Amino acid sequence: MNTKIRKHNKIFIFIYLLFAGGFFCWLYFKRAFNTCNFNNNFNNGNSNCTVYKDMGDFCFLFWVVTLIVLVVFTINNVQTKGAKALKTPALVIVATVALYFMAELVLAMVLKN
């Protein structure tokens, strides 16, 4: 019984890492596209910024698909194991929110100088 719980936690963490990777990839390429677009408008040049837009769209689609898979996997675990199955997802989500805000704070401090 305990090995099944550990196996499901490993699968959840893997799916969650894909989800977080897709989310941060989408944010990165979205910002890269906006920066490239701003530089093109400022310099009146014509550059190929569509690569960033296409990669951002792909990462957004990947993020949405992994979100759906993550929700379905979590609902399936809750149906089979009850409320104790929400322990790992809740801890992972709280840790992610904390790390995201800390990263944004550090990034704001670095870019301020």
Image (cartoon, helix red, strand yellow):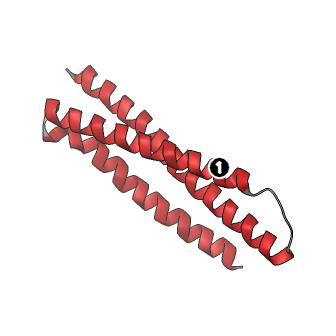
Please name whichever residue, 95 or 40, is drawn nearer the observer in this view of the structure: 40
Horizontal arrangement in the rendering, residue 99 relative to residue 106 (left or right): left
What residue is drawn where x is 42% and y is 61%?
98
Horizontal arrangement in the rendering, residue 56 relative to residue 3 (left or right): right
What residue is drawn where x is 22% and y is 33%?
77
Horizontal arrangement in the rendering, residue 36 relative to residue 105 (left or right): right
| Crowd rating for badge 1 (residues with CA inside 10 Å; few <14, some 14–19, many 20+) | some
- On screen, 101 above or below 87? below
Please name whichever residue, 10 or 29, is drawn nearer the observer in this view of the structure: 29
Quarter of the view holding residue 107:
bottom right
Image coords of residue 64 (percent x, y)? 43, 46
Residue 9 in sight in this render: yes
Image coords of residue 42 (percent x, y)? 81, 77
Residue 25 in sight in this render: no
Image coords of residue 108 (percent x, y)? 60, 73
Horizontal arrangement in the rendering, residue 39 relative to residue 63 (left or right): right
Q: If the image is split into quadrants, where does the C terminus sit?
A: bottom right
Quarter of the view holding residue 45:
bottom right
- On screen, 95 above or below 5? below
- On screen, 15 above or below 32? above
What residue is drawn where x is 52% and y is 46%?
22
Asked which secondary structure carries label 1, the reply is helix
To which residue does mark 1 refer? 54
Quarter of the view holding residue 10:
top left
Amino acid type assigned to the residue bearing label 1 in the image: Asp
Image coords of residue 57 (percent x, y)? 57, 50
What residue is drawn where x is 35% and y is 55%?
94
Figure disc tally: 1
Please name whichever residue, 47 or 6, is drawn nearer the observer in this view of the structure: 47
Q: If the image is split into quadrants, where does the N terminus sit?
A: top left
